[in-house]
Image: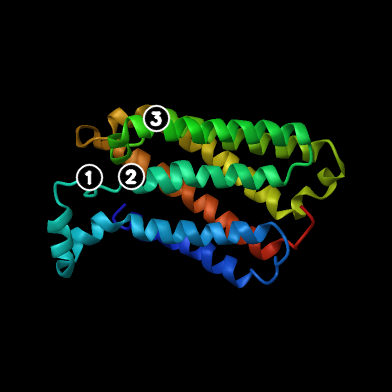
Amino acid sequence: MNNFSLILHSVEVLTAIVGLFCLKKYKGTIVRYFIYFSVYVAILELIGAYPRYLKSYEFLSPIKDAIEGTKLEKNHWLYLIFWTIGGKIFYSLYFRELINSQLQKKIIKYLLALFIVFNVVYFALNWEAIFESSPIWISILSDSLVILSIIFYLIEILLNDKLLEFYKSINFYIASTVFVWILIFTPLWFFDDYFSTNDMAYVKLKATLILCCNIFMYVTFSFALIWCKPQNN
């Protein structure tokens, strides 16, 4: 736990670096967008740790003093916009592109549009909520949208010849890994009330789960990028 951030950022950066080395290999395939997204996530995580940087480095004290007491003092807004909402929109669009069924594509398209409109309206009326802890319903809706997109993709694999070579497809590894990650991670949102210094047992448990889930996800991504060969979507 003393090296939580270091380990977490290391596996994220690892996937980004592996992806960049494999970028030429996946040129012309949809996987290149996943590689760009991996770099985006690594940069987001490094930037998102700015509250810790401000506390740890003396030369950043002017910035710390400038934002102290403001809504930018905490990083909730950054992860809400660029991960909880933005990251899940990317995954939904990514898996949508892997689906051939026009009906399923339309379902994802309309649900995604509703999700975006709902968020825009909600935060337009409650703009201060952006700077608070992410509302649980946003996390649940965004995760549900990704889960539905993955299920549509996996069903399509089961219904055609792709099933015979699923283990060679990097998109299968991406889909199954994200699916497992969300199934483990999403229930934690319901227990956020326990995430306080009054219940350090839960704080340590959640931190351990987050760390293990992320190591599993990013190491699997790195392995898949190296092991799999470029294929048609």
Observer able to see residue 106: yes
Looking at numbered disc 1 in the image, what kind of residue is underneath it? Lys
Residue 115 or residue 29, whichever sits in front: 115
**Residue beneath disc 2:** 77
In the picture shown, does residue 190 fall above or below 23? above
Crowd tier of the residue under label 2, counting other residues whose Cα lies within 10 Å: few below 14, some 14–19, many 20 or above? many
Apparent side of residue 215 relative to residue 162 in the rendered image (left or right): left
Pointers 2 and 1 in contact (C-beta within 8 Å): yes
Q: Where is residue 183 in the image (x, y as percent from the top left)?
A: 54, 34
Question: Which residue is painted at 54% across and 50% down in the image?
Answer: 217
Apparent side of residue 110 relative to residue 75 in the rendered image (left or right): right
Give me the C-alpha separation between circle 3 and circle 2.
14 Å
**Residue beneath disc 3:** 122
Crowd tier of the residue under label 3, counting other residues whose Cα lies within 10 Å: few below 14, some 14–19, many 20 or above? few
Q: Where is residue 158 in the image (x, y as percent from the top left)?
A: 80, 37
Of callouts 1 and 3, the N-terminal one? 1
Give me the C-alpha separation between circle 1 and circle 3.
18 Å
Give me the C-alpha separation between circle 2 and circle 1.
9 Å
Apparent side of residue 61 relative to residue 211 in the rendered image (left or right): left
Looking at numbered disc 3 in the image, what kind of residue is underneath it? Tyr
